């Protein structure tokens, strides 16, 4: 991958992957906590931080382009469910 993409795009791919996985794990953790019947306190700062992460994810996705996303397809299976899970953070 490193040889096929420009260094900036490769860096964006790595950043996108890390951020996507971080947000996915956080959302799934929140779902487990909710299913256990526990409340999750949210603050305006936390909400804004999640919105910022989502905006960064969208910007990185645009920078990576279709070929970069195709490279990530075996690792990240983007479906409507994944978008809903990330939406759980909001």
Image: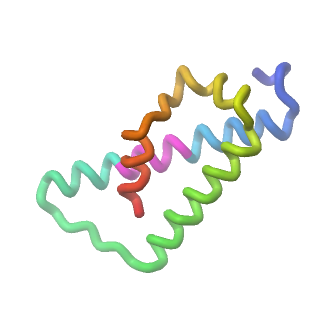
Find the magenta span and give its range: 20-27
For residue 41, above or below residue 72: below
Q: Residue at x 64, y 24 (%)?
A: 70
Q: Residue 9's spot in the image, x, y percent?
A: 80, 37
Q: Give the quarter of the image for residue 69.
A: top right
Q: Residue at x 76, y 44 (%)?
A: 63
Q: Residue at x 26, y 51 (%)?
A: 31
> Where's the C terminus, which quadrant?
bottom left
Q: Which residue occupies the foreground of this view, 27 or 64?
A: 64
Tally of numbered tags = 0
For residue 54, above or below residue 40: above
Q: Residue 3's spot in the image, x, y percent?
A: 85, 20
> Where's the N terminus, which quadrant?
top right
Asked if the stretch drawn in magenta spans residue 24, the answer is yes
Please give left or right for residue 46 compared with residue 28 in the image. Answer: right
Q: Residue 24's spot in the image, x, y percent?
A: 43, 45
Can you name the residue that lies furthest to the right here?
Answer: 6
Q: Residue 41's spot in the image, x, y percent?
A: 29, 73
Question: Which color mode does the image show?
Answer: rainbow
Please give left or right for residue 44 compared with residue 54 in the image. Answer: left
Q: Residue at x 69, y 52 (%)?
A: 59
Q: Which residue occupies the foreground of this view, 54 or 49?
A: 54
Can you name the residue that lies furthest to the bottom here?
Answer: 44
Asked if the stretch drawn in magenta spans residue 71, the answer is no
Which secondary structure type mostly characterizes the magenta part of the structure?
helix
């Amino acid at each position: 991958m490193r040889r096929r993409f420009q260094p900036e795009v490769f860096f964006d791919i790595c950043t996108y992957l890390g951020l996507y996985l971080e947000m996915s794990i956080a959302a799934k953790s929140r779902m487990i906590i909710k299913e256990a019947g526990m409340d999750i306190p949210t603050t305006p700062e936390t909400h804004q931080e999640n919105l910022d992460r989502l905006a960064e994810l969208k910007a990185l996705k645009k920078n990576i382009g279709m070929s970069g996303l195709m490279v990530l397809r075996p690792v990240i299976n983007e479906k409507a469910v994944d978008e809903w899970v990330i939406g759980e953070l909001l």
